[in-house]
Amino acid sequence: MKKFLKNISPFNNRTEMPAILFVVKIILAFGVCKIIGELIAEGIVILIHFALSKNIFEGEMFDQETITLITYYGYIVVVGITILYWKLIARKPLSEMGITKHFGNYFIGAAVGILLVLISVTVIMLTGKIEFHGIFKNIHYIMIVLLFDGFIIQGATEEFLCRGIILCSLKNRTSLAVAIGVSTVMFIIPHLSTLLDMGAVYGVLGIINLILISIIFSLLTIQFNSIWVVCGLHTSWNFILFSILGLNLSGNDETVMAIFNMQSVGKNICNGGKYGIEASVITSIVLAVATALIWYINKKKVTTK
């Protein structure tokens, strides 16, 4: 039992163990980085409230937009904890986590994200289930820029955890299918509570889309041997969808601060209902095609080597 606990403990860099135990170990490492990072970030948020004479225990809090920004910026603590774990406990070079000098890959990923969002939204508009109502008159550009920075941090946080800690740890110790599968499951779990509140149909479509986009993230990480490409894709997807097009992002109920006024027409499987296009059957088709294309390119690249 003592050896078993040592093997699966996320607080050492032991790797000589059965693959299933190593998977458990990496999942625990994921949990440790996420929970510790979020607890520290939450503590900082509480301190900021008190420093500005707001007693959150008596309901004195910032407005929703400010809370959203603080939350997104607070994720940088999770990123820091993840990097510290990789360096100090896993004792591996950052390059093995995909943190390479090729930061230009970030912009390649961002372009892919923009393309995927625009194709999905355009096709849904052709069905009449999303309508364009012009440009907002009072655009809060400063808030949009601040949200963009927040999405950079938020996107990087999820990718450092799922593709960094999990995928990059498992891909050389297990089969690629297992590595991608585990990173996908851990990517989906935080979204489940919101998805399950949307009803069975939207919940299933949302999960399918999360699986597809997670596979895309994993394949691109492997293809480019870099985590920057998926950080860029993740950020651009969220930012374009929410802050440029003004559409719902992952079922949130926040006030829209965007440039374009685009609205869903009714609630249906084409526009994803309240959850947004991430629970749309059209998005499923777009992501499935993109997944197949990236897989084919990846396979062809491996074959020609």
Image: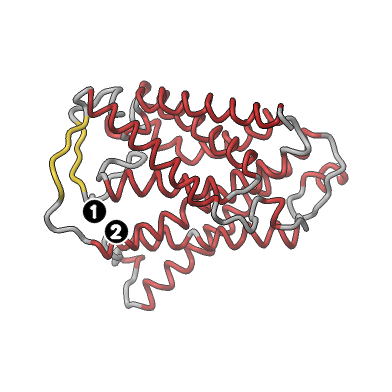
In this picture, residue 151 sits left or right of residue 226: left
> In the rendered image, which quarter is residue 198 located in?
top left
* Image coords of residue 181 (percent x, y): 62, 31
Residue 88 image offset from top left, x and y in percent: 74, 62
Q: Which is nearer the N-term, disc 2 or disc 1? A: 2
Q: Amino acid at mark 2?
A: Ile
Element at label 2: helix
Residue 171 falls left or right of residue 47: right
In front: 47, or 242? 242
Residue nearer the viewer, 145 or 192: 145
Type of amino acid at the residue the image marks with label 1: Met
Give the class, few, some or many, for how many residues have Cα within 10 Å of label 1's Cα (few <14, many ≥20). many
- Tell me, for residue 238, which label it has, or none: none
What is the basis of the colouring in this image?
secondary structure
Residue placed under numbered mark 2 in the picture: 144
Instruction: Give the total number of marks visible in the rendering.
Output: 2
- Quarter of the picture containing the N terminus is top right
| Residue pictured at 41% horizontal, 54% vertical | 151
Quadrant in the rendering for residue 125: top left
Mark 1 and mark 2 in contact (Cβ < 8 Å)? yes
Picture quadrant of residue 284: top left
Up-down: is 25 above or below 35? above
Which sits in the foreground, 191 or 288? 288
For residue 84, above or below residue 176: below
For label 2, count other residues whose C-alpha is less than 10 Å away and answer few (under 14), some (14-19) or many (20+). Answer: some
Specify the farthest residue to the front.
304
Instruction: Return the residue at label 1.
Output: 257
Image spot of residue 103 (x, y percent): 57, 56
User: In front here: 134 or 29?
Assistant: 134
Q: Is residue 81 left or right of residue 140?
A: right
Task: Pick the quarter of the image with the C terminus.
Answer: top right
Residue 222 in percent (x, y) is at 65, 39
